[in-house]
Amino acid sequence: EPDRIVKIPDDFNPLVSAFIELISVAYQGISKFSEISITPKDTLGVWGDGNLGFITALLLKEKFPDSKVMVFGKHLENLNLFSFADGIYQIHNVPDDLAVDHAFECVGSSASQSAIEQIIDLINPQGTINLFGVSEYPVPINTRMVLEKGLTIQGNSRSEREDFIGVVETLKKDPQLFEHLEKLITNVCEINSLNDLKDAFDRDYISQFGKTILKWNK
C-alpha cells in the first residue's frame, strides 16, 4: 500500500540504499534496547564480524557516541574494517579483565551458542543481551548465570516502517555513515539474464564479508 513507502533522498548512494532493510532491523533492535536497558551504557559489546555486526556496531557508535563500542569476532581481516570501533578482539584472545555493560549477538547459526556463552561470562550484572543472529538450531543457554546476574534477553529480527524512516533520517543527519557502509559492498553485479543471476549468487557464495548488490537492467 502507498502508506508503506518511504522516500529515499536523491543524493543517497543507491548501492547502500539497497540494504537499508538490514540496517532497519539493527535500528529497531537498538531502539528497543534503549527503552529496556536500566544500567549504564559505558561499554557496549558486539559479537560478530560480519555484515550485521558491522551495521550494529556502527549504529551503536552513532546513537551512543560517548560509549565504548567493542567488537568481538573470529576473522582479523574483518575486524580490521571496524575502524570506528573503540576496540576489536578475536574471540580466543580477550583480556581476562574485560567486561561489557550490554551485549549484541550478531553471529547466528550454531556458532551463536559459543558467542552467548562468552557474552554471559563477560557481561556485567543486570545487563541486556540482544539477540540478532538467526539460528536454525536450538541454542542452549546457561540460565543459571542469566538468573545469577539478573540479565535481560531480547530478540530482534524484524523492522517496521518507522524504523526505515529512522534509518533514512540518521543517514541524512550524518552522511559520513555512507563511507563506512560502502565497505560492505563487495560485489556489484549487472543482471541481464538468468546466467548473470547465477553468476552473482556464485560470487556472493565465496565472499566471506560484505554484500552483493544486484543491478537489474531493463
Image (cartoon, rainbow, N blue to C red):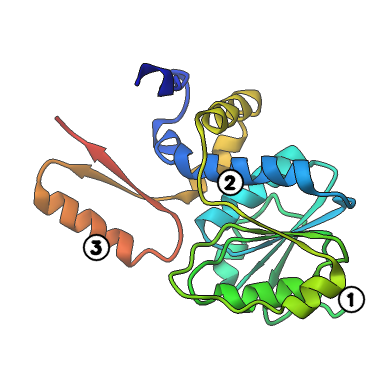
**Circle 3 Cα neighbour tier, 10 Å, few/some/many (<14 / 14–19 / ≥20):** few
Secondary structure found at label 2: helix
The amino acid type found where label 1 is placed reads Asp
Q: CA distance from mark 3 to mark 1?
A: 43 Å
Depth check, front residue: 63 or 153: 153
Res 97 label = 1
Res 41 label = none
Q: Position of residue 7 (x, y in %)?
A: 44, 19
Q: CA distance from mark 3 to mark 2?
A: 27 Å
Mark 3 vs mark 2: which is more N-terminal? 2
Q: Quadrant of the N terminus?
A: top left
Residue drawn at x 60%, y 41% as measured from the top left = 28
Q: Position of residue 138 (x, y in %)?
A: 51, 75
Q: Position of residue 125 (x, y in %)?
A: 88, 66
Q: Are marks 1 and 2 in contact (CB under 8 Å)?
A: no
In the picture of the structure, the residue carrying the numbered disc 2 is 26
Q: Hey, which quadrant is residue 87 in on the image? A: bottom right
- Which of the two discs, 3 and 2, sits closer to the camera? 2
